Amino acid sequence: MTAAYLEKLNPEQRLAVEHGTTAGDSHIAGPLLVIAGAGSGKTNTLAHRVAHLIVRGADPRRILLMTFSRRAAAEMGRRVERICREVLGANAGITADALAWSGTFHGIGARLLRDYAEQIGIDPAFTIHDREDSADLMNLARHDLGFSKTENRFPTKATCLAIYSRSVNAEAPLDGVLRDFFPWCAMWEQQLRDLFASYVEAKQMQNVLDYDDLLLYWAHMLQEQLIAEDIGSRFDHVLVDEYQDTNRLQSSILLALKPDGRGLTVVGDDAQSIYSFRAATVRNILDFPKAFTPSADIVTLDRNYRSTQLILAAANAVIDLASERFTKNLRTERQSTERPRLVTVRDEADQARYIADQVLENREGGARLKQQAVLFRTSSHSGPLEVELTRRNIPFVKFGGLKFLDSAHVKDMLAALRFAQNPRDRVAGFRLMQLLPGVGPSTAQRVLDQIGEEASPITALTELPPPPRTGDDWTAFVETMRQVKSGKAGWPAEIGLVRQWYEPHLERAHEDAATRQADLVQLEQIAAGYGSRERFLTELTLDPPDATSDQAGVPLLDEDYLILSTIHSAKGQEWTKVFILNAVDGCIPADLAVGSSAEIEEERRLLYVAMTRAKDNLDLVTPQRFFVHGQHAQGDKHVFASRTRFIPATLLQFFEVCGWPQARAESAAAIRAREVRVDVGARMRGMWR
Ligand code: ATP
Ligand code: MG
């Protein structure tokens, strides 16, 4: 008799789920690639495969599962738990967190690096810099080398970091990266080399790793055969979702873990590759089978279970115009009579009103807010909509935009915890000390210089004479750091200590201290969910909670709220009703001026990703008029926008084309009517002749 969970799958999905599991329990299957279109059940198949492996006796602690976000990993854990309980019963003890090694590449990397820190000569107390911290550190290095003064034309800190990051992630030499992606910076090659050398040195001195280091150090650690074998042998199965968006470093990590591919499963969709700016390469997925002998088994899935036939037809039509050929032709059996809508509105304000109206109407019709999502190319596009939603009291959560942790007071608190964890972390220390009245940048620098080289920086700190005019504030600061560092209070009590110390500073610096204090209470609650200070800092830096409409961190699970998300962050998810904002040239594709054809193609895939998130209804909204913030001192102005080039006239047949509000939007007939010139008076006069 076949288990019920297998019977729900289609034959191809089942092939992937059962791949190599029929040959006996101790057998580990050869490499497997599932390559298939959007909504064909790749993620679902992966979850079933993990569950099936466990049902067949695999040890969940020896499964390594890597997903696109921590949220996706948690969701995967829940699905695995559900299936395992169905088959094995609750007594088998398979819970959602039984998968001890599931998370993002970066999160898993951080954990392994702490485990092996001693062997590779790093201090396991390292802290992790987010992009903003990294840019700050890069900036310090720029200043130290005097590059920030070079007639002001030296690349900005953000550009420097982007160049560095691309070079590292693509495992590509700097000159090539400059030539291909940053030609206007090529003249600075030697200076950039010096800058990166000193940036790397600064990170090592301060015992911090940036995001890229988590992959880079991991990959380098695996170059040591014995370590690679040791880590590889910890895991019987390694499974990766969204493989099309991994970069060279990530694929070399996988190959080092499982050189013969046994136990390795990857799934992805080449038509959805949207992360090339992080050096992701679709070659990873295309070359996967060839990386092994015998080559990997490939399963393709061609039935879409997510979208209605009319939505899928429109999405397929969009991707069919791509210059590359994606081989999958998706079909669905979900019939419907509603074509996706292409809605013309006057401007962004009307766009916001239209969406708010529709969202409420949908809710009346039974679709909860959570089943609806508004997607956009760039985080800033949702500004007018956020205002409108707030005005109408429609709660929302925004993914991929401003994070809870981006607010100054939360950053202050985290800097304090980070500094206690790793007192060599200068970016944290620099931020922190300047909270003290009387301490400016130069004093902060000096103190950090004085303690930075000491074996025990916090002890050194307690022995320093207080800087002038700091008095009791200094003593309170030093004492708090000492207490937290000692770890005696335990976690999460430590964060309470930091909050006690920080509150007077908060009141001094911010008028809205009361609201901010509420955030800190919430931060403490979030913190309680993590086992240790180190775990909390790592996870929070790598995958921070998203901002809600009231900026209060993560909403309660039973609340209903609308989802606002960048298209990038919407990857892998689905909603009953989806709105795509600003379906106009200049927004998607973004920034026409600099688009190489490869970049434009990536924008097309982005639109495809966005459209394929919808289950029942899809609206693409196109404002006719746009307000742009002037660059190069041209000032702000209105520009007229045209429908995205990815939906040329030949594709309009796939959409219901309409305007909103009906009375105001100009129909084609109305525009033509305005061109008409008749002399009605003459006709009147002629009537009597
Ligand atoms: P994406 O490319 O967007 O990541 P995907 O290929 O990972 O999509 P899933 O998210 O796994 O697709 O599945 C899409 C939807 O189809 C989900 O709602 C899932 O529950 C449903 N689904 C998948 N397989 C089946 C099946 N055999 N029977 C019924 N529903 C299915
Ligand atoms: Mg998926």
Image (cartoon, grey):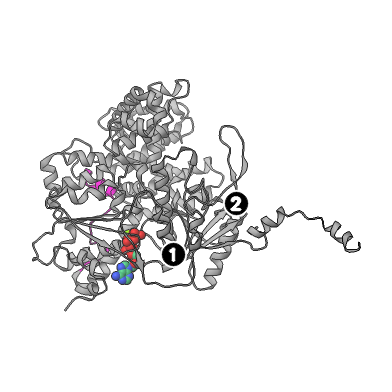
Q: What residue do we see at 22% from left, 43% from top?
A: 113
Which amino acid lies under the numbered mark 2 shown in the image of this protein?
Answer: Gln
Residue 45 in view in this figure: yes
Comes first in the chain, label 2 or label 1: 1
The residue wearing badge 1 is 311
Q: What residue do we see at 21% from left, 68% from top?
A: 93
- Furthest residue toward right: 689
Q: Quadrant of residue 126?
A: top left
Q: Nearer the viewer, residue 665 or 277?
A: 665
> Quarter containing ligand 1?
bottom left
Q: Nearer the viewer, residue 373 or 408?
A: 373
What is the number of the mark on residue 624? Answer: 2
Q: Where's residue 266, x and y in %? A: 23, 55
Q: Which residues are magenta?
A: 93-113
In this picture, is 47 found above or below 146?
below
Q: Nearer the viewer, residue 435 or 117?
A: 117
Q: Where's residue 134, x and y in %? A: 37, 36
For the C terminus, give its image quadrant. bottom right
Q: Where's residue 508, x and y in %? A: 53, 40
